[in-house]
């Protein structure tokens, strides 16, 4: 008989399969609730239950093995609350996608999951899943599964689902399904059933009730009362470019005629990347093009922190570092990391190095100063002032104006540095 | 268009995320993986719906669900996450759901080095759909590309009802540069056209474009079926029926047909005999190399491929018209060269590569033996 939900009475399952009962009871619950059938979306998993799609009048989405709860969660997140998303999944799919189920419960996504738990993978020939009770016979464990099984209801309840129920899949359990569908947030029903083709074949003397009791799986309902899923509230912007300050160019001559590379090499937490940003801003103010990138170990809070900068009066194509013209080394970490590069510097290269560090073996011209004496956090910035003074690529005035724009002048020992550079 | 100069410092990640948002992408779901985490951060302040997913399989499943209901989702990842997504991208491809996956390449194999750049995933992209079906891949090489190609990629995803990949690399996605953003014209949001007739809706029925009309699941006029399994036009699972096989073949054709009329490249053509081919980050070095060679009086042409996969007929025609072809890629096996010319490169084709560092113009000039 055709119903509002099912377009056939001839469901595509083996005779006596518990899946018949789940489809019929779900159909009955939807009809009793008076739902518009096109407000219902079925998301089905891989397995015998998944071939129900063609028999349904609702929207159907048929995905991958084990992933249907995540897929259904996505469908639900995209829809208003009055839509009902129902996921059909087997015990095999529930095992594969256990994390998806727990996540959907934790997020309390507006979703009803119905697990067709017949203790085995039916479609592939009767193998055991993570929900197969210990002692249950399957094709690969003819003397009973030696493993324990998940209590999926307890897991999902603990994860925060609003409605969880375990039922025996015989007779009328449509009211339980209706309750689940009516509960806002995440609901899950574990329907215990038997697969006549493989379950009965391998466990001929056992009855469903007895298997469930022996597995110590109580037939009961668990409830929570948590707010259903909604997307997190955040501070948002209308345009990501609003967060990038416009840099006014100065009307000054460019002293640089070709692309140069500057490396700032220091320690994490000592303002290397900030100093790099300030240098780049200054260079752009002076009309140059720049590229800037940072390198640090995987743990960002310790060890070296290096910034690689290109400055050019022309368009910059390649920005990879080969042989920098200028290097600023302010700490032992930076020194160790850049040792090799220091050794290969050309003789016209300039190396600014803190006086606490060893004098490196290099052809480059070395300028040793007490950068760290201005405080570790100011070391690279102080070195930038020396760099500006020595090279004239940018001016110390420009550095000062950027520090003032960024409200950094107060904490910066400018007078001392200027005295030293004079 | 704003003509007042607006010089700012930004990275490709910001430009791609803004372009996609302006083009109409409203959802970002993802997992913060290096070197794509800047995009994750930008999405968290820009996208209407933003959700952290516990892993990349969940990411693609949530995105597919959102896409099925009419949203336009975006994610950004790199190889370790992308590998987890492959089955689910196949699902979205078969269901015909529009979405954008940004793949920021880093050094492999496996977790490799998260903070070193690479162009090592092209061979994977070429074969990632079971059956060898093509998935569109676009590859920006400049800030302007990040703007135009990202918007076009979203339009492509909608027009084709297909996941589209934007391919970047750590060395572009995480490098700041100065740029005058007044050069980026505002992007018009994509207008989505849904099935409108009162005739029954057949979810995978198609016309000349080979793309079926779209209707979100949950619309209350017509039943919608989506499936990742082999299916007929009604979306009913089939074994290998004629109608289902026609549908599977159509999926290949619809992408190839579209890419042959919608593709981007930059061909610097001085009618030389020699062509340098490159894409993405390496295209920057290749451009510098070719300019240097030309300045030295050596006539060399350059092709920067932007619609990387599938390879448009026009791009194939250009590459096959040269006497000598040199590929420049940040990998050690010439992945793109081999996609075009096969595993044993013909004598007139060579390849210059690098690993663990950016391929430099000098290496291209020396390696290309011009
Ligand atoms: S094999 Fe088992 S689970 Fe599958 S339809 Fe038949 S009885 Fe049901």
Image (cartoon, coloured by chain):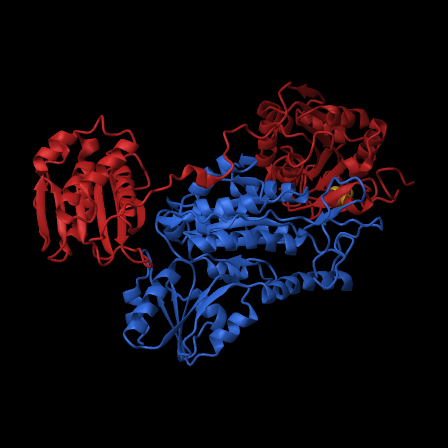
Chain colours: A red, B blue
Residue at horizontal 51%, vertical 58%? B138
- Closer to us: A47 or B156: B156
- Residue drawn at x 39%, y 65% is B333
Residue at 28% across, 37% down: A274
Q: Is residue A339 above or below residue B241?
A: above
Foreground pick, A84 / A418: A418
Residue A18 seen in render: no
State which image quarter holds ligand 1.
top right
Pick the front one: B270 or A182: B270
Q: Quadrant of the C terminus of chain B?
A: bottom left
Q: Is residue A71 left or right of residue A34?
A: left
Q: Quadrant of residue A417?
A: top left
Asked whether, in this view, residue A389 is left or right of residue B229, the answer is: left
Q: Find residue A135 and report its image quarter.
A: top right
In the image: residue B132, left or right of residue B277: right
- Does residue A4 appear left or right of residue A351 in this picture? right
Q: Position of residue B155 (x, y in %)?
A: 60, 53
Residue B297 sits in quarter: bottom left
Can residue A6 be seen from the camera position used here? yes
Residue B325 position, x and y percent, is 41, 75
Number of residue marks: 0
- Please state the horizontal and vertical placement of residue A31, each as a whole percent of the image: 85, 31
Q: Position of residue A64 (x, y in %)?
A: 64, 46
| Depicted A199 relative to depicted B191: above or below | above
- In this picture, is A177 found above or below B311? above
């Amino acid at each position: 008989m055709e119903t509002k939900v099912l377009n056939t009475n001839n469901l595509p399952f083996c005779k006596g399969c518990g899946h018949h009962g789940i489809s019929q009871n779900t159909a009955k619950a939807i009809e009793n609730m008076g739902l518009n059938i096109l407000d219902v979306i079925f998301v089905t998993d891989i397995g015998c239950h998944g071939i129900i799609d063609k028999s349904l009048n609702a929207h159907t989405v048929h995905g991958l093995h084990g992933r249907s709860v995540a897929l259904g969660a996505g469908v639900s997140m995209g829809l208003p609350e009055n839509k009902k998303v129902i996921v059909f999944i087997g015990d095999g799919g529930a095992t594969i996608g256990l994390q998806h189920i727990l996540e959907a419960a934790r997020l309390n996504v507006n979703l009803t999951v119905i697990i067709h738990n017949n203790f085995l993978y039916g479609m592939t020939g009767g193998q055991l899943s993570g929900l197969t009770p210990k002692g249950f016979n399957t094709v690969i464990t003819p003397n009973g599964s030696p493993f324990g099984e998940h209590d999926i209801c307890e897991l999902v309840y603990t994860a925060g689902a609003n409605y969880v129920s375990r039922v025996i899949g015989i007779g009328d359990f449509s009211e339980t399904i209706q309750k689940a569908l009516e509960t806002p947030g995440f609901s899950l029903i574990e329907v215990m059933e038997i697969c006549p083709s493989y379950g009965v074949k391998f466990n001929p003397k056992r009855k469903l009730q007895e298997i469930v009791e022996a597995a110590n799986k109580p037939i009961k309902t668990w409830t929570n009362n948590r707010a259903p899923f909604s997307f997190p509230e955040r501070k948002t912007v209308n345009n990501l470019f609003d967060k990038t300050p416009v840099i006014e160019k100065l009307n000054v001559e460019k002293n640089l005629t070709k692309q140069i590379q500057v490396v700032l090499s220091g320690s994490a937490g000592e303002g290397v990347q900030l100093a790099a940003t300030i240098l780049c801003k200054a260079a752009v103010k002076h009309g140059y093009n720049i590229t800037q990138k940072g390198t640090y170990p995987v743990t960002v809070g310790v060890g070296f922190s290096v910034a690689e900068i290109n400055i050019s009066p022309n368009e910059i194509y390649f920005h990879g570092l080969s042989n920098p013209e200028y290097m600023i080394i302010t700490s032992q970490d930076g020194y160790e990391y850049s040792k090799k590069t220091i050794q290969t510097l050309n003789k016209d290269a300039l190396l600014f190095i803190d006086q606490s560090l060893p004098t490196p073996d290099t052809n480059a011209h070395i300028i040793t100063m007490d950068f760290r004496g201005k405080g570790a956090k100011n070391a690279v910035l102080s070195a930038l002032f020396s760099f500006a003074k020595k090279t004239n690529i940018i001016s110390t005035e420009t550095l000062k104006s950027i520090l003032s724009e960024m409200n950094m002048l107060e904490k910066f020992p400018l007078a001392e540095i200027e005295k030293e550079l004079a | 268009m704003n003509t007042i100069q607006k010089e700012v410092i930004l990275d490709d990640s910001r430009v791609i995320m803004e372009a996609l948002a302006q083009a109409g992408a409203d959802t970002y779901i993802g997992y913060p993986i290096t070197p794509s985490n800047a995009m994750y951060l930008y999405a968290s302040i820009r996208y209407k719906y933003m959700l952290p997913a516990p892993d990349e399989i969940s990411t693609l499943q949530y995105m597919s669900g959102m896409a099925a209901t009419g949203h336009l989702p975006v994610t950004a990842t790199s190889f370790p996450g992308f590998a987890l997504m492959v089955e689910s991208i196949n699902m979205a491809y078969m269901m015909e759901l529009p979405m954008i996956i940004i793949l920021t390449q880093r050094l492999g194999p496996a977790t490799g080095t998260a903070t070193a750049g690479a162009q090592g995933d092209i061979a994977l992209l070429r074969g990632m759909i079971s059956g060898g079906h093509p998935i569109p891949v676009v590859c920006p090489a400049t800030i302007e590309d990040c703007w135009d190609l990202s918007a076009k990629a979203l339009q492509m995803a909608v027009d084709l009802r297909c996941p589209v990949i934007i391919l970047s690399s750590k060395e572009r996605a995480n490098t700041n540069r100065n740029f005058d953003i007044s050069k980026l014209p505002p992007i018009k949001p994509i207008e989505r056209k849904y099935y409108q007739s009162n005739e029954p809706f057949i979810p995978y029925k198609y016309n000349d474009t080979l793309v079926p009309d779209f209707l979100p699941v949950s619309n209350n006029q017509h039943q919608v079926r989506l499936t990742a399994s082999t299916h007929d036009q009604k979306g009913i699972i089939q074994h290998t029926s004629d109608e289902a096989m026609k549908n599977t073949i159509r999926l290949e054709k619809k992408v190839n047909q579209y890419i042959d009329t919608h593709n981007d490249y930059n061909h610097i053509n001085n009618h030389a005999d020699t062509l340098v081919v490159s894409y993405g980050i390496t295209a920057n070095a290749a451009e510098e190399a070719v300019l240097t060679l030309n300045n030295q009086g050596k006539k060399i042409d350059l092709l920067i491929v932007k619609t990387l996969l599938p390879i448009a007929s026009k791009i194939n025609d250009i590459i096959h018209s040269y006497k000598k072809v040199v590929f420049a890629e940040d990998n050690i096996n010439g992945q793109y060269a081999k996609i075009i010319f096969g595993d044993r490169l013909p004598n007139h084709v060579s390849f210059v590569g690098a690993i663990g560092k950016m391929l430099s113009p000098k290496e291209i000039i020396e390696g290309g033996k011009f």
